[in-house]
Image (cartoon, grey):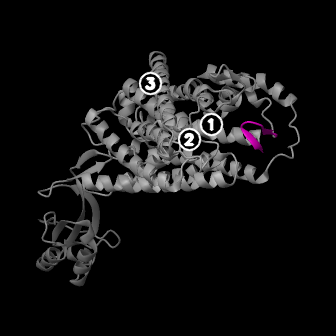
Amino acid sequence: MKKIEAIVKPFKLDEVKNALTKIGVQGMTITEVKGFGRQKGHTEVYRGAEYTIDFIPKIKIDLIVSDELVPGVIEALERAARTGKIGDGKIFLSPVEEVIRIRTGERGKDAI
Amino acid sequence: MKKFVYLLIASCFLIAPAVFAETAPPSSPKVDTGDTTWLLISSALVMLMTPGLALFYGGMVRQKNVLGTIMQSFIALGVITVQWVLYGYSLAFGPDIGGVTGSLDWIGLRGVGLDPHPDYSPTVPHQAFMIFQMMFAVITPALITGAFAERFKFKTYLVFLILWATFVYDPLAHWVWGVGGWIRELGALDFAGGLVVHISSGIAALAATFVVGKRKGYGEEPMPPHNLTMTLLGAALLWFGWFGFNGGSAIASGSLATSAFVVTHISSAAAALSWMIFEWRYRGNPTALGAASGAVAGLVAITPASGFVGPMSAILIGFVAGVLCYFAINLKMKLRYDDSLDVVGVHGVGGTWGALATGLFASKTINPAGNDGLFFGNPSLLAIQALTVLVAWIYSFVVTLVLLKILDWTMGLRVSEEHEINGLDLSQHGETGYSF
């Protein structure tokens, strides 16, 4: 089992969600986050006062998937979230030791 | 504070017997119902401008100060209403003493009844005129609060409201509008308050930025507006209320009110456009805040001229107001003054332009009771307007400076540094604006 964290542009969320459910992903958790990478922030001007906004809004998607789904999920994420412009985001992949479904007590792959 | 409240209550009792003794006379047949209707509606429209201003300012501050900022405007409705009834109206409009102040004959609204007043409101009950003027007295000091937003102590602010109304607004209103007031006698034209409302508050704001000082972190950390939709809603309410502000200043329904209503709208529209266009040209974006600020600048500028100019003049007045005020607030950024919400740039500069523009564009064909301006063949009006602008500038600046200095020594103007960091909402009012 793997945990996939993807940080994407907020307006791409719907496309990404549809692409993932299409290939069999059954659940996901999203969080509104702020941060910067190479894209850096932007400036806003209010009545002549210029402010640099360092942290720009992104959506973080958390998924736990079984190993065989991983390549498909990554491919779907890349395809759906890409605009080709700076700031498209990143995908992080890490191993997951255990998953437990609270309602039934199921463990491992069955609990995903 | 306690002493002050007791004093206030005691003074109510002192004045009350005199007022109750005077049973309201039956309204006289001279009252015109159409005029009265329009003046009462106008009073309600102008009342709505103060909460509108609260939203306009409230959206421009940081989230932690939204209630503190809104309260500074909102509570003026409470404080100034009582002050106006007790003695403010009498100081401003009561029987003249030497051209400089009203007497105290009308304290507690003694003698301010339901008959028309021959000079101020010949076809409308005197009390209707009184409450219409009250709404102007309420919003004017509230306008100043934008200059010291996000750092002023609420308790000191309440005392400042009373002092400023007593020593700046009431005398100026008497000079310009009171029968026998010396600026009125001079022949200066101020239809709805360019001098009395906008120059007085705009220049008081300039004095306040000097005495109060910058916000902590000004120029170093970002202080962007937290809710511009609120600001736009506030600007819309101001625009709406301004029809009463200027249209109502005819103190009658009919052609003059219509003319003032029409030019008010035109000037606001033209200024919204010009501010937006210039900001677009110099900063790359046509901002919503810019359009809203421009609209308000246009309303400010047409205020003194609204009863004396025609539609084409209104377009010019508004267009120039948007440009002038836009450049004024940019100049502030260069000079590094923390006039936080641009009261000087919008009301001081816009009001000054409006008062001078009245001397340029006024025409007797619009209002025979007015005068002709420079462009209609009479240069002397412009000189009178310039002189009175100068007087209003100096008077408001000096008196506001003195009042604030005294308050600084006695009560302190600013909240503590810790309170400023935590925000006015929690430190001054013990509540927060949002919880979602």
**Mark 3–mark 2 distance (CA, rounded to whole Å):** 19 Å
- Residue with the mark numbered 3: B413
**Which residue is found at the position 26% from the left and 55% from the top?**
B281
Q: Residue at x 44, y 24 (%)?
A: B413
Q: Residue A32 magenta-drawn?
A: no
Q: Earlier in the sequence, mark 3 or mark 1?
A: 1
Residue B68 place in picture, x, y as percent: 47, 38
Magenta stretch, residue numbers:
B115-124
Q: Is residue A85 above or below residue B289?
A: below
Q: Are marks 3 and 1 in contact (CB under 8 Å)?
A: no
Instruction: Estimate the spatial distance between the alpha carbons at disc 3 and disc 1, rounded to whole Å.
Output: 21 Å
User: Residue B395 — which label?
Assistant: none
Q: CA distance from mark 1 to mark 2?
A: 8 Å
Q: Is residue A50 left or right of residue B41?
A: left
Which secondary structure, mark 1? helix
Q: Are marks 1 and 2 in contact (CB under 8 Å)?
A: yes
- Give the residue at mark 2: B74
Q: Which residue is mark 1?
A: B78
The amino acid on which the numbered mark 3 sits, given as a three-letter code, is Leu
Q: Looking at the picture, which amino acid does disc 2 mark?
A: Phe
